[in-house]
Structures are given as structure tokens and as C-alpha cells.
Amino acid sequence: MRGRAERATARAASFDRTRADHRQELAEDYVELIAELIETTGEARAVDLAGRLGVTAATVANAIARLQRDGYVKSEPYRAIFLTERGRELAAYCRRRHRIVLALLAALGVDPATAEQDAEGIEHHVSEPTLAAIERWLLRQGVRLD
């Protein structure tokens, strides 16, 4: 049996991971939405992001500045927002992860609206080993993930 100190250290590490996941969640949501807007409308504009996310223009401006600093997007004032190669890779990863989690929830019989909403939260916190295990299980069940 693990000692009290080991359990406390493990618990602290778990909280650290959750905090890191929350910090990354914002970037992932923005990058995923930017990719979707570019794909469906040909461009991503700050006003469209604000409307879709239900936030202010200032909130979007701050997020875009952070995404630029982190190398995910390129943007100029009053112009469309573009994903860098790094941003496109993150968006593709987020879409894949979302599809896997959504497919799992659907396979469990969760109604589509609830599954979509829950997948948005779960996808940001599932570890890569767990995601891989879910994907293997879904494939064994014959679930298509494309």
C-alpha cells in the first residue's frame, strides 16, 4: 500500500495535469473553430469566432494574440485569421480526438445532442493512452471513425 506522501504526490500530479489541460483547452477550441470556419466559409474572422463562442471581441483578440505567440495562427488587424502548419496539425488532432470520443458516447447509447456536448469536455482531458484504447475498442466493434 502506498504511503500518505506518495498518495499526496500522485494527487498533486493529477491536479497539475488537469490545470495544464485547462490551459491547452482554450487554444484547442479556437484552433478547431478557426479550421472549421476556413473549411466552411473560406475564412476565419474574429467577429465570427466571437459570435460562435459567445465571447467579446476583446476576448477573441487576447486569445488570437496568445495563439500567434504560441505559433498556431497568423493574423493582422482587421484581416482574416490563418492557421500555421502547427495550428493545422493541432486542429486535425483535435478533430480526430473529438470523433473518437463522440463515437464512444454514441456506441454507449448517449443521445446525439448530449454526446456532442459531453464530447466537448471529455476530449480535452482524455489521455493519449486512453484515447488509443478507446479507438482500438471502437474499431473492434466495427465503428467507423472517419
Image: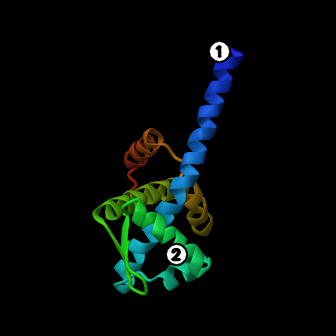
Residue at numbered disc 2: 61
Above-or-below relation of 128 to 88: above
Quadrant location of the C terminus in the rendered image: bottom left
Q: Is residue 116 visible?
A: yes
Residue located 51% across and 54% down the image: 24
* Display colour scheme: rainbow
Query: Which secondary structure lies at badge 1?
Result: loop
Q: Is residue 35 left or right of residue 101?
A: left
Front position in the image: 9 or 64: 64
Q: What's the residue type where badge 2 is placed? A: Ala
Percent across and percent down for residue 84 are 31, 67
Q: Residue at x 42, y 48 (%)?
A: 138
Residue furthest out toward the left: 85
Q: Nearer the viewer, mark 2 or mark 1?
A: 2
Q: Is residue 123 visible?
A: no
Q: Is residue 124 above or below residue 128?
A: below
The residue lying at 54 percent from left, 75 percent from top is 60
Report helix, strand or loop for mark 2.
helix
Q: Is residue 39 left or right of residue 1?
A: left
Query: Pointer 1: what residue?
Result: 2
At a point 41% along the width and 81% down the height, the residue shown is: 44
